[in-house]
Amino acid sequence: MERIKILIVDDEIDLISTLAERLALRGFQVETATTGAGALERLAENGFSVLLVDVKMPGIGGLELTAEIKRVRPGLPVILFTGHSSFDDAERGMQEGACDYLVKPIDIEQLILKIRNAVGAKEGFQS
Amino acid sequence: MNDEELRRLREAELAFFGRIAAGISHDMRNVLSIIGEYAGLLEDLAALAERGKPVDLERLKKVSGSVGRQVRKGTETMERFSRFAHAADEQTASFDLAGLVENTAALAQRHVAQAGCRLEVELPEGALPVRSNPFSLQRAVHCAVDTILSCPKREEMIAIRIVREGPGAVIRVSGRVERGTDGELAARIAQLSAVLSELRGSLETSATDDTLCLALSVPIE
């Protein structure tokens, strides 16, 4: 079975590097981007299975990035991270096309479940 | 000030306080999330060690150092927020204007960064003692930064400079912006003028071809 390839997009470098290491220890192939623009550049080159995107980022924010991803790669699942305990951002993100969301701090087991669900749904959709 | 004006003022002050508190809450959640990830990584490394993988001491030291950095960042954020919040304790207090502006600017950094800009603060040498309303002064500085942020920008930098002038001090907030004014800018400037009136200060707005400068004059006593 092909390894799930993930792109994590967040301006908090410490967060994404540590999360990437933890996901890699669990067998995922992980790349990171610290800006929305950087994520869009990477998207053009690489075959990602799923994107994990923080809602609040300078420049292209997570909601704007989600909308752009849905425009250029409609089948690519996006899971949002939000630092707000209110669900407004998450709901807006789902309206933009995100398939799921997580409120920080991130529970890694819950995240992996959501990643597998998202990739499974995408593969089911494609088959 | 009549009752209606007072009510509107209190609402605006509460909204300002809430906005700063929400930003701090977001920053602290990020700090805790990062510490949580490092704790999770240590658990992962411990689990690997139990299964026979040698412990990488250098990796552990690096994680420990990173956790320490996040704790210091969180502590500094909370200390800044505490200074901000305690400014509401008294209507009139003696304080260092430079310190207050520096703290206000630091608290505004993330909000400014979210808009794709950065703040640069130039402080006078030494303290600049004033007797005024510290909470309203914080609000005035924040309003000025927001006013510049609301304009279409030519450059990402917003500058804050404090100088002693005559019997008072002037806080200059400026940024390179596109020409032209609209209703929103006029409303923001009017709001900022009202805040400065409460402080017995004044606002001078100057615009060149590409720079908008808001000069906030405040009396020292």
Image (spheres, coloured by chain):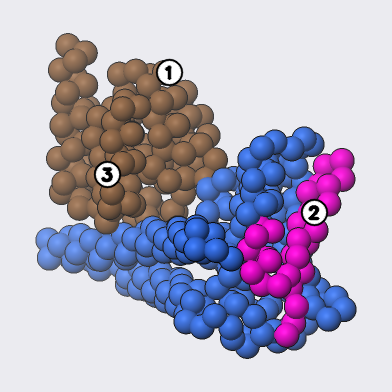
Chain colours: A brown, B blue
Of circles 2 and 1, the one toward us is: 2
On whether residue B213 falls in the magenta region, the answer is yes
Q: Which three-letter amino acid code belongs to the residue tagged 3?
A: Phe
* Total labels drawn: 3
Q: In the image, is B184 to the left or to the right of B122?
A: left
The secondary structure type at the circle numbered 1 is helix
Q: Nearer the viewer, residue B162 or A43?
A: B162
Q: CA–CA distance between discs 2 and 1?
A: 44 Å
| Labels 2 and 1 positioned on one and the same chain | no
| Labels 2 and 3 positioned on one and the same chain | no
On whether residue B60 falls in the magenta region, the answer is no
Of circles 2 and 3, the one toward us is: 2
- The residue that appears at 30% across and 18% down in the rendered structure is A75
- The percent coordinates of residue B179 (x first, y second) are 79, 36
- Residue A21: assigned label: none
- Judge whether residue B64 can be spotted in this image: yes
- Residue A72: assigned label: 1
| Residue A74 in the image: above or below residue A30 | above
- The percent coordinates of residue B189 (x first, y second) are 69, 51
Q: Which of B180 and B201 is in front in this view?
A: B201
Q: CA–CA distance between discs 2 and 3?
A: 40 Å
Label 2, on which residue?
A: B205
Q: CA–CA distance between discs 3 and 1?
A: 26 Å
How packed mark 2 is, by other alpha carbons closer than 10 Å (few <14, some 14-19, many 20 or more), is: some
- Residue A87: assigned label: 3
Q: Which chain carries label 1?
A: A
Q: Which chain carries label 2?
A: B
The secondary structure type at the circle numbered 3 is loop
Residue range (magenta): B192-221
Q: In which quarter of the image is the N terminus of chain A?
A: top left
Q: Which three-letter amino acid code belongs to the residue tagged 1?
A: Val
- The residue that appears at 50% across and 41% down in the rendered structure is A35
